[in-house]
Amino acid sequence: MQIKQISIVDYQLVTGLFNQYRVFYKQVSDIALAESYIKNRLEHNESVIFVAIDGDEPVGFTQLYPLLSSVRATKNWLLNDLFVDAAHRKQGIGEALLQTAYDFAKSHGATFIELETSVDNFTAQSLYEATGFVRQPANTTSYYYRKAI
């Protein structure tokens, strides 16, 4: 398996995975929307996307958005999306994508990575906690996690 940061020329590598991710969160399948959204984020340098590739097949991705902190005078990162294709789960791909995101943030001077997940997404919660993310105080619909750098 290889993990690489994609650019605008590679946007189609994650379009199908991004669509599956949205469907997982109870959105209507819409490949055209997924393609447009990913393409626009990359064209406008609004996010950083890493894709996991097994052979020639994209099997997972993560998307990070910058969080600017005036007080800290740093750019931290919101790990907004993490998805691994169902047929490739439980193989360490999610953990590898999280580590890649962490390494990227660290190498760019961030002081933390933050993320959010549903209170009923127990699989994700286990993964985040196993990889050093710390759950923040909860609300009724989501858990927030943060990992210091």
Image: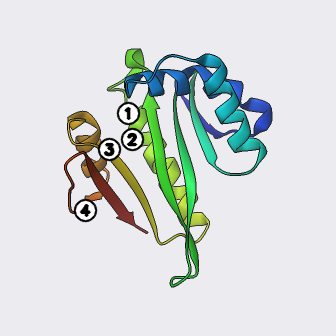
Residue positioned 57% across, 18% down in the render: 30
N-term-proximal mark, 2 vs 3:
2
Judge whether residue 140 can be spotted in this image. yes
Amino acid bearing label 4: Gln
- Closer to the camera in the image, 63 or 36: 36
Question: On the rendered structure, is 9 left or right of 24?
Answer: right
| Residue beneath disc 3 | 117
Question: On the rendered structure, is 89 left or right of 22?
Answer: left
Contact? badges 1 and 2 (CB < 8 Å): yes
Amino acid bearing label 3: Thr
Residue 84 sits in quarter? top left
| Residue beneath disc 1 | 92
Select label 3 or label 1 by which is in front: 3
N-term-proximal mark, 3 vs 1:
1
| Residue beneath disc 2 | 95
Mark 3 to mark 4 CA distance (whole Å): 11 Å
